[in-house]
Amino acid sequence: MKNDVKTPPVAQYDVCVTKIESLNKHTFEIELLAPEGTILHYKSGQYLKLELDVNNDGKPLWLSYTISSRLDADKPNKVSLIIQVASDFSGKVVDCLFAANANNQSVKIMLAMGKAFLQTNLEQPHLFVAAGSGISKIKCITEEILHRNPDANINIYWSNRHNDDFFLLEQFHSWAAAHKNLNFTTILESVQSDWTGRTGFLYEVIQQDHTDLNETQAYLCGSPKMVYGTIDQLNALGLQERNCYSDVFEFSPRAEKLEA
């Protein structure tokens, strides 16, 4: 049965912003470090909440971000996030983190949350579907699977609107080169002059590559429309919603399920 895996209790920690790395023109990887000796308990695929006074009004907000790094036994007090600057608000978030880093100020986090963490049988094929920054969760889960079972059958599909929206491509391509059963496919929503790769809706490209998804375990990261639309379109290939995992199921349940 889904989500019967026990998760550690949610806890708060004071952390330092130890590293901010630019991944592309509007995407940053943030490294947070709790005091030495701390173990940040979480499962790959969960998210945390970060407390920041984004509006500089003395009213800090708790903001949710997917954890982008698997728990490292050698550095269990470290956690990473990937944040895209897609609005004025997210720009202020990154500015706050740069300020905390520059001034050596700690920030509070609360973790871990979310039911769409890695909990599936790694002997079964896995399908990972991400749009935009949703790849953050997929990166974390992929790291964990490869650590546990380097020969796992994994197919990753990542869609963006523009060629320069992609990041960490070297990491994903190196995984695909090193692991014979891992396939990584980048997709643009529409044809563009500087793009020679796949185009179309995520489900269309997946349909071109697969004929039977009956035993496949799927993790989907993106908008409710993308997640539910992809599941519905792939149902004809045997993909079962009971074998699908997404934070969308918690935040935006299907309308008919709300009426039940």
Image: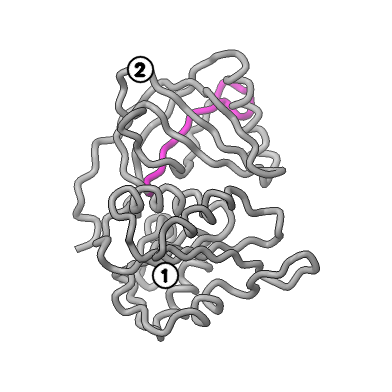
Which x, y percent locates residue 86?
Answer: 67, 47
Q: Which mark is residue 36?
A: 2
Which x, y percent locates residue 181?
Answer: 39, 65
Q: Which secondary structure dominates the residues rendered in magenta?
A: loop
Q: Which mark is residue 58?
A: none
Mark 2 vs mark 1, foreground winner is 2
Residue 14 on the magenta span:
no
Quadrant of the frame with the N terminus: bottom left
Residue 107 drawn above or below residue 48: above
Instruction: Confirm or deny contact between disc 2 and disc 1 (CB under 8 A).
Output: no
Q: Decide which of 255, 205 is in the foreground and name it.
A: 205
* Residue at the image point whose x is 41% and y is 64% from the top: 180
Measured Cα–Cα span from mark 2 to mark 1: 46 Å
Quadrant of the frame with the C terminus: bottom left
The residue that label 1 is drawn on is 255
**Which stretch did the figure color magenta?**
45-59
* Residue at the image point whose x is 63% and y is 32% from the top: 94
